[in-house]
Amino acid sequence: LKLELPAWSLSPPYPPTYSSRSVLQM
């Protein structure tokens, strides 16, 4: 799943892998 908004920043309920991907994309 690809979220344009920094959902990982709001609440990191998903695994660290998804968060890391989001941060890298940013």
Image (cartoon, grey):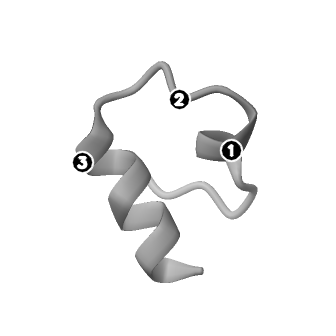
C-alpha gap between disc 2 and disc 3: 10 Å
Asked if residue 11 lies left or right of residue 17, the reply is right
Disc 1 secondary structure class: helix
Which label's residue is closer to the chain start, 2 or 3? Answer: 2
Tag of residue 9: 1
Residue displayed at 60% across by 80% down: 26
C-alpha gap between disc 1 and disc 3: 14 Å
Q: Residue furthest top?
A: 13
Contact, CB < 8 Å: mark 1 with mark 3? no
Tag of residue 17: 3
Residue displayed at 75% across by 56% down: 5
Asked if residue 15 lies left or right of residue 14, the reply is left
Tag of residue 25: none
13 lies above or below 20: above
Instruction: Name the residue that disc number 2 marks.
Output: 12
CA neighbours of label 1 inside 10 A, class few (<14), some (14 to 19), many (20+):
few
CA neighbours of label 2 inside 10 A, class few (<14), some (14 to 19), many (20+):
few
Pinpoint residue 8: horizontal percent, then vertical percent: 59, 42
Residue displayed at 48% across by 58% down: 2
Asked if residue 11 lies left or right of residue 15, the reply is right
